[in-house]
Amino acid sequence: MKVLSLSKLAEEAAYLGTGERRFAGGVGDVKAFRENLAALDSAFHGVFCWIAFHPSTDSAVAAYLEAGTLAEDTGPNVLALFLAAAEIRLPRELTQTDLQLGVTIEGGTSAVAELVSWLFPGDSRPVLPGIVFFDRLAAEVVNAVHVPLTSLDRQGVTERCRLLFSLAERSLATSASVTRVDLDFDEFCRRLDAAGIGYDRVGPATLRRAGYSLWDWVKKHRGEIAAVLGKALQMRGGRG
Amino acid sequence: MASSVHFGGLPISSDILTRGLRQFQLAGLLCGAVGIGGSDRRIHGIWQHYVPLSFALSLAETRDPAGFAIEDAPVVYNPGSWHQQALCGRAGRDLKLDPADLLTGYMECWLLGVRNEDAAADHFVKCLLWFFESRGRRLDDALAFLADLHEAGLVVSGNLLLAIVTGFWAFYARNADLSFMKASTMADRDRLNRELGRLRRELHNVPPSQPKLHAVIDWFIDYGLNLAAQAKGARTLDEWLIARARMVAPYSAMSQWFAAAGELGLTLTQRTSLSQIDEIAQDLVSEFGMFRLRADQHLPLAWDLDLVNAVGKEYRRHHSREEWLDRVVEERVAAPEAVRKIVMQAGAVEPGEATVPQEWRICTEAVAVPLCLVLGREAWSFRSRDFGAEPLTRAAADAGGDVPAARRELARSETEFYASLIALPQASFRLDLDEARLRYPWHAFFSRSSGMAKGLDGALDAALPEIESALLMELRDPGNWAALARGAELTRRAGDSEFLNSVAAGLIELSGGQK
């Protein structure tokens, strides 16, 4: 399964759109990074998902990533992200090392837990491991759904993830009426309900009121965020 | 896949023939990397250099048909000289190849490739389709075979590789019924040509299947990224240059696909990967172009981090002094990891300040000799460092301002001077020899003399590699074969010694008795 740092993927997405390569890895290049992410937001034709897990305690999820089928499972419209140990600047196969030290422990709170608590404010914080589906990277997140992957062995994680990606694929909106991205979150949640899968959801009202920003988190961890290069990932427009 | 020669019970001969064969194959690969245009002359020059190798391989096979084998040499048939049923395959695994068939096949492929690219592409496509159809219709296997042909130096240019892939997918992506190829052999060649011609006409208006086109592109992206990983992991300059030479043609083909991304309906992943590959493809052109430029000026053919420094300047504008080199290595693959570590051991540097030790500046004869043949130059005449300004200015004035000619003339007179010193029976000659070896790393006489001097001192382990290097620098000199025969004799390899001496004697006979 090929992976690439989100920062590099975004840089390439911006280049595909404009023909201009904006280096964004340097300390002072936050603006370029945000512009690149915006380019990725608009180039990518689908929904983002975050594989939220702790590699040392959530071994079933780590094993699923290592097995390498995620790139095929996500299909053409889901871009999967996770935290890696180091920046990956040229697409390459995921290794076990990439998943080690992939979590920055700060005051006992992992970066992944921090992300989930930002996205899902309130008392009943979603438990990890899980998958978070969300709609934006550079701009404010409007919709997010967290589905837990707790109490599952590797086979269970694989089956659950495949089902979730399949449900997401079937919930893609053909128009932009619900949000500016293509996943119809209402439809997705209806399908989750029908399948008897528990989830947590936040919508625009909650996120706006809380003033949370995924951007702040992404900016902070931009060197460690890796994207799974699913072979079928679709894009809109672009040069060439 | 690395080709090898097995010559029963003769390790020294097997090793030298293997290394000679790999050098010959590398010449083909470098034709594509450096670019020779439509030059028949270069191809003939390469062939002339390796006639003794062809002679030695044939002699080995004649002497011990049962104990001789060429292994893992991918090959397509050559109409002039081919004694197999199969149209193509891998020597050893699929075919028991006559060395003459193998080497003549290279020569024919190279000449066809430079004279008539379309005809060459048709030939490869026919063989590739036959391979695909007769080996279970597995795309991965067929493309891996094409990659083997390319890496073994049979595909003489990047344009030819692209034409072969385009020709292959014209059938593959249109779901062509190729069942008529399945049980066919060389005896059916005319029928295969007719059937393929008919199919090509029939398929002309059939739209290609996009998933099948994408499958081919995905395979090449994976292959290209694996080649980049191999280059990054190179442990020596030879490994680096060979890995980079392997990247040139596929990266050039992928650049073309990137330019046609919209038309091909490429996915975000494909475009992202190809976008980076396109950038690296441009780096590869400039890296090998630098060798051409240096050869034109008769400057040392050294790998002096030119690309790292050039690319590094752009990266340094955005990254810290500690970071830029990591980026240049990680995402542009402009140098191997080993070099990054060497450079950084001395602390953070600015682009232009980075230097590497001699073993990372100057490749061995394994790469230098085929590189010089492709560049149309003589390897022996290249220095490891340029001449000083003063002698060069004087020589340039004598050469009417022609600086490259001045360098050549200075090299000629300096090597003659060293050769005369080495011939003198005085104690200091070994100092001169060491200096001569350092200055002229690919001069066969200096290398052989150095080996013989070590042999005289009883250091046979150090002597043999030098004599082997000398032979691989100049295969046409019977004296180099005879020197290795003597080395083999001293290491009690009587069979090797006898064979190598017979090659030397045969070469003398072939040249009309001139030693």
Image (cartoon, rainbow, N blue to C red):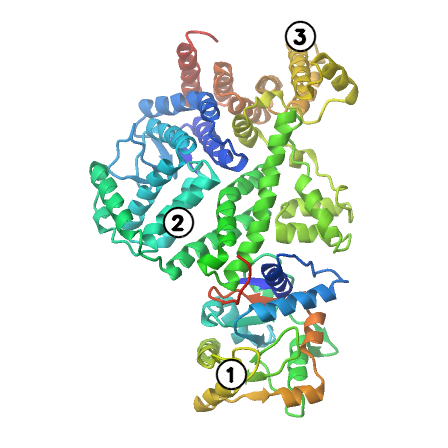
Residue A184 is tagged as 1
Parent chain of label 3: B
Residue B425 is tagged as 3
Q: Amino acid at mark 3?
A: Pro
- From the viewer's perspective, is residue B93 above or below residue B503? below
- Secondary structure of the residue carrying numbered label 3: loop
Parent chain of label 1: A
Residue in front for this viewpoint, B429 or B85: B85
Residue B420 image offset from top left, x and y in percent: 66, 9
Left-right relation of B322 to B404: right
Name the residue furthest front: B205
Q: Identify the residue position indicated by label 2 in the image.
A: B143
Name the residue furthest bottom: A123
Q: CA distance from mark 1 to mark 3?
A: 90 Å
Q: Nearer the viewer, mark 2 or mark 1?
A: 1
Residue B228 image offset from top left, x and y in percent: 55, 49
Crowding at mark 3 (Cα within 10 Å: few <14, some 14-19, many 20+): few
Q: CA distance from mark 3 to mark 2?
A: 59 Å
Parent chain of label 2: B
Residue B510 image offset from top left, x and y in percent: 40, 12
Q: Is residue A48 visible?
A: yes
